[in-house]
Amino acid sequence: MAVRAVRGAVQLERDEAGHMEEQVGALLTAVLERNGLAADDLISIWFTATPDLHSDFPAAAARRLGIVDVPLICAQELDIEGAMPRVVRILAHIESDRPRADISHVYLGAAAALRKDIAQ
């Protein structure tokens, strides 16, 4: 079993805790489903949020999904002029037998524009 990294992002329509929970939950669910993963396959998840998001910690959505024994951390993205607003990104470290080339990185909605080279 190898350690792999999975990237993903979602752009929120508004900065509200319930909306963040829904959208980040959808992102995490898609990452797990598209990569054939269970919560036990997760090693850790880094969450970042753009500086315009203040309503909640993105990691709270993972806890509400039942991901309770995996180390999670949140950080703020760099405040770059012209960057896409209201974006939550993830970097999940996983255990998987999949080759690196077969990992599905998940960019939902408008966030797909962030990484057209790897978004699936």
Image (cartoon, rainbow, N blue to C red):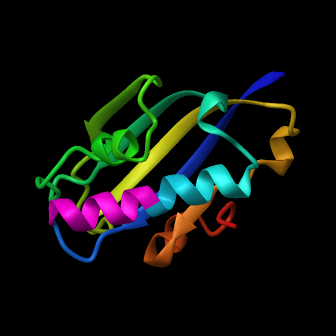
Which residue sits at x=68%, y=64%?
117
Q: Position of residue 112 (x, y in %)?
A: 54, 71
**On screen, 50 above or below 64?**
below
**On screen, 58 above or below 73?**
below
Q: Position of residue 54 (x, y in %)?
A: 11, 53
**On screen, 72 above or below 52?**
above
Magenta extent: 16-25
- Locate residue 48: give its quadrant: top left
**On screen, 50 above or below 120?**
above
Magenta-span inclusion, residue 20: yes
Q: Position of residue 80 (x, y in %)?
A: 26, 55
Which residue sits at x=80%, y=23%?
2
Q: Position of residue 99 (x, y in %)?
A: 88, 39
Left or right of residue 22, residue 15 in this image: left
- Locate residue 20: give its quadrant: bottom left
Looking at the image, which residue sits at the far left? Answer: 54
Front residue of 77 and 8: 8
Magenta-span inclusion, residue 40: no
The chief SS type of the magenta part is: helix
Front residue of 42 and 73: 42
- Locate residue 43: give its quadrant: top right
Q: Quadrant of the N terminus?
A: top right
Which residue sits at x=33%, y=48%?
61
Q: Quadrant of the C terminus?
A: bottom right
Left or right of residue 11, residue 67 in this image: right
Front residue of 62 and 1: 62
Which residue sits at x=12%, y=55%?
55
Front residue of 108 and 52: 108
